[in-house]
Image: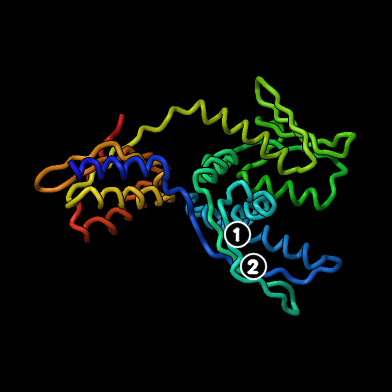
């Protein structure tokens, strides 16, 4: 009876407090900039630190993301990373002759980040680019063009005139950006003074509707046997949820308690089967555990 109560307690904790935070330490150096106050330099350093921390976690979720796209993602995240920050601690901050050195410990909300990367289309365009067209005003400035080009690279677009989806950038009388997304049978609008906000708003709608047309991937059932107690199962559940480069979602669906040992089954949505097999082979055999994978519903 005590064992059953302990299992229920652990399962309740897992449901209420899932392990969805990633943490990492980042080092930032901001060189001295003309007409930039120490306070502004500190603000920019923290924004870069947040971007680096989120990028590190994103690259775990997106194995194979090339260097150009990673740099473009960092450019976007600098100033747009806060929604993914669960908390941070400033470990050190020191002004030197050349600029500002800062070290931060940053905790990332992995669930929110994964949802954000989906909206950016990074999972859909990781292996192959999306053919699309993008148009911009003739009088666009060099700085604006650099931002736009970074967003195109980050999203993973291959530009081809006259194709759909088509993104059109315009200016409003209020000196804001107006974006239009045109598909075969619909058109969306977005207006904001931040070009990146307009871009992400429209492309998030596109990737959301295109994803809805894809049949949901069938999940796999991962069954592991050989534990001596339920405690090991619940600890491995936490480990499995942390394998972001291999598993998108994992849900403990069954425990099988026998006098000779305990087993468990997870319903998993796999991102990278080869990597998952490697992680399982490096984790399980040395603990006397065996596993098998079968097709889910």
User: Vertically, is 93 above or below 19?
Assistant: below
**Residue 172, quarter of picture:** top right
Q: Secondary structure at mark 2?
A: strand
**Residue 26, quarter of picture:** bottom right
Q: Nearer the viewer, residue 259 or 152?
A: 259
Mark found first going from the N terminus, 1 or 2: 2
Residue sitting farthest toward the bottom: 97
Mark 1 neighbour density, 10 Å: few (under 14) some (14–19) many (20 or more): many
Tag 2 residue: 28
The answer to whether the residues at label 1 and label 2 have Cβ atoms under 8 Å apart is yes
- Count of numbered badges drawn on the protein: 2
Mark 2 neighbour density, 10 Å: few (under 14) some (14–19) many (20 or more): some
Residue 194 is situated, as x and y percent measured from the top left of the image, at: 76, 43
Residue 72 is situated, as x and y percent measured from the top left of the image, at: 65, 53
Residue 28 is situated, as x and y percent measured from the top left of the image, at: 64, 67
Residue 264 horizontal side relative to residue 199, left or right: left
Q: In which quadrant of the rendered image does the N terminus lie?
A: top left
CA gap, disc 1 to disc 2? Answer: 9 Å
Q: Nearer the viewer, residue 19 or 184?
A: 19
Residue drawn at x 74%, y 77% as measured from the top left: 98
Tag 1 residue: 52
Residue 20 horizontal side relative to residue 150, left or right: left
Residue drawn at x 71%, y 44% as measured from the top left: 196
Residue sitting farthest toward the top: 185
User: Vertically, is 132 above or below 17?
Assistant: above
């Amino acid at each position: 009876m005590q064992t059953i109560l302990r299992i229920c307690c652990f399962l309740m904790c897992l449901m209420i407090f899932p392990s969805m935070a990633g943490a990492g330490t980042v080092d930032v150096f901001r060189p001295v900039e003309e007409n930039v106050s120490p306070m502004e330099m500190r603000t920019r350093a923290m924004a870069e630190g947040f971007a680096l921390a989120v990028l590190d976690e994103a690259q775990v979720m997106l194995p194979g993301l090339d260097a150009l796209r990673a740099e473009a993602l960092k450019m976007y995240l600098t100033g747009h990373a806060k929604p993914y920050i669960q908390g941070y601690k400033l470990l050190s901050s020191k002004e030197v002759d050349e600029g500002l050195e800062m070290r931060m410990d940053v905790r990332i909300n992995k669930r929110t980040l994964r949802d954000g990367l989906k909206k950016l289309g990074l999972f859909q365009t990781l292996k192959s680019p999306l053919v699309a067209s993008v148009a911009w005003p003739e009088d666009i400035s060099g700085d604006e063009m650099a931002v736009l080009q970074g967003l195109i690279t980050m999203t993973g677009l291959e530009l081809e005139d006259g194709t759909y989806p088509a993104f059109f950038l315009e200016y409003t009388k209020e000196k804001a950006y107006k974006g239009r997304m045109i598909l075969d049978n619909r058109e969306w609008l977005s207006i904001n003074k931040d070009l990146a906000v307009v871009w992400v708003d429209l492309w998030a709608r596109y990737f959301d509707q295109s994803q809805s047309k894809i049949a949901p991937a069938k999940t796999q059932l991962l069954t592991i046997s050989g534990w001596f107690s339920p405690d090991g199962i619940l600890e491995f559940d936490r480990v499995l949820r942390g394998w972001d480069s291999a598993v998108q979602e994992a849900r403990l669906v069954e425990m099988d308690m026998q006098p000779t040992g305990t087993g468990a089954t997870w319903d998993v949505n796999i991102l990278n089967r080869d990597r998952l097999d490697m992680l399982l082979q490096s984790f399980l055999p040395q603990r006397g555990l065996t596993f098998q994978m079968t097709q889910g519903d």
